Amino acid sequence: MSWQSSYKHKIVTAEEAVGHIQSGNRVVVGHACASPEALLSAMVENKDQYRDVEIVHMVSMGASAYCLPENNPHFIHNSIFAGPTSRQAINQGRAIFTPCHFSQIPKLFTDRILPVDVTLCMVSPPDEHGMCSFGISVDYTKPAAESSRLVIAEVTPHMPRTLGDSFIHVDQIDWIVETDARPTILNPPTITPTDEAVGGHCAELIRDGDCLQLGIGAMPDSILGFLGDKKDLGVHTEMFSDGVVDLVEAGVITCSRKNLHPGKMVATFFMGTEKLYSFVHNNPRVAMYSVDYTNDPRVIAQNDNLVSINSALQVDFSGQVVSDTIGFNQYSGTGGQLDFVRGATWSRGGRSILAFHSTAARGSISRIVPCIDRGASVTTPRADVHYIVTEYGVADLRGKSVSQRAKALIDIAHPNFREDLRREFENLYLKDNPFLRPMPEGRRSGYWPHEHDGDYLKQLAV
Ligand code: COA
């Protein structure tokens, strides 16, 4: 049978398609803005037919009605990255959370650690070869579909046809639901003066010819706004948004100095507006791969001068970075932060940047703290961290002792909190320490405890 006839035979309604899901199945859902919303609403409407269907995915950008309390006996959401519509369910104990680096998620499915019964995804219409593109979400969606017992695809002409290793053949799809749905839109964040200050400091760390990774949140967009005078930037990232399109059109991003995939922007998913989605459609300068490739630190490190830019919620004096929990509450997920921090560390000339506002909760909390909150989880360990950036400047933590890190971090904390932080520092590291003595003559950076000398105390007081 030709793929064209097989395609026609597989077309069903959304209600018919979700009728193939069975109680107790594990269902993997297409990621982020490529979430197949028509299939998901049909599944939730059909809920009385199921019990304990496990819904696995990362960033939830859609309605996530399966997370609502009234749908609880029918579904259990297993989240790998909390989003606005799943966060409450996780923190109220109605959903579960599985920590995993983004690069490792495909392995959960392909190695049958979490065997997949059904994949629900959104793809572009088939091309003349019968190939549908996973479009703006290749990441774990493609490996899940490839290792799944059943693949149900929402096919819409609005899904961009992205290129690279981003395709599935019609023969690999079991049921097709044709819709006119558009991928979810993520509007660019409003950039505040504080974002701009952080962005300006980050831009100072970026040089012509660097290859960029851009994380989630307002920070990456505000940094892009400061890169207009750079030359020949490259992109090897897990995701990007609209801001990158402007820099390509301005001739700033050319990828001409990349040594891995020269000339191409490499990514695994996109979140943005129609502007971004039209830009990536059929664009040979954009190459999409599964996340086990894009986020493998060994692959990332093959790009020289790789600069990773991500954000965080809290950092302690020793440099431990918390980016996905607020105390015991799950805020987001590990994502690809450590994948890229490590890839950047191993890249020749590479640098990793973790950038955030110095305060949270409308200025009432310092994000730079002596110790991380009880219940919080470390996303980037202190031995991996490199640059920390706030609106007050840059702390380069690499090669610094714990007490030197504390000092560098206090220097970029919000002025309202510096005095308290200094007092905490003295209590933790200096008070009643019988070993304190002056730093040996000519010694610029000593090992603990030698560095806790009088001069150092004086420096802290400045
Ligand atoms: N204590 C209490 N609340 C805090 C806090 C802290 N230490 N730090 C932040 N918050 C609050 C903020 O006030 C804000 O609340 P609001 O929405 O009510 O104003 C909220 O938490 C979110 O903080 P913000 O810094 O604005 O988040 P963001 O949207 O810019 O995202 C991360 C930042 C760190 C959550 C996000 O980058 C992330 O999830 N990173 C982990 C994964 C990763 O980096 N992956 C790589 C790219 S996918």
Image (cartoon, grey):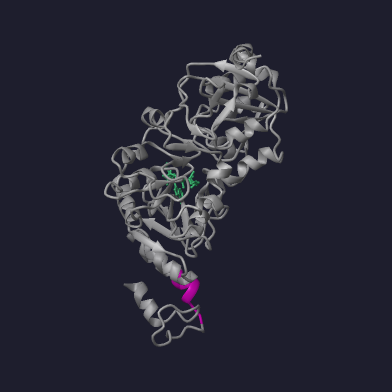
Report x, y in % for residue 167: 55, 29
Residue 20: image quadrant is top right
Q: Taken as a whole, is the magenta stretch helix, strand or loop?
A: helix
Give the residue drawn at x 31%, y 37%. 249
Residue at 58%, 43% in the rendered image = 292
- Tell me, yes or no, whether the highlighted magenta stretch contains residue 429: yes
Residue most extreme to the left: 229
* Residue 299 visible in the shown view: yes
Give the vertical position of 297 relative to 124 (above or below): below
Q: Residue furthest bottom?
A: 441
Residue 318 magenta-highlighted: no
Give the quarter of the figure containing the C terminus. Answer: bottom left
Q: Where residue 373 sits in the image (x, y, percent)?
A: 52, 55
In this view of the protein, can residue 55 be seen by the observer?
no
**Which stretch did the figure color magenta?**
425-433
Image coords of residue 83 (percent x, y)? 51, 37
Task: Identify whether 94 is placed above or below 307.
Answer: above
* Residue 396: image location, x then y, percent: 41, 64
Where, by quadrant of the figure, is residue 11 drawn? top right
Q: Looking at the rendering, in which quadrant would you find the N terminus?
A: top right
Quarter holding residue 425: bottom left
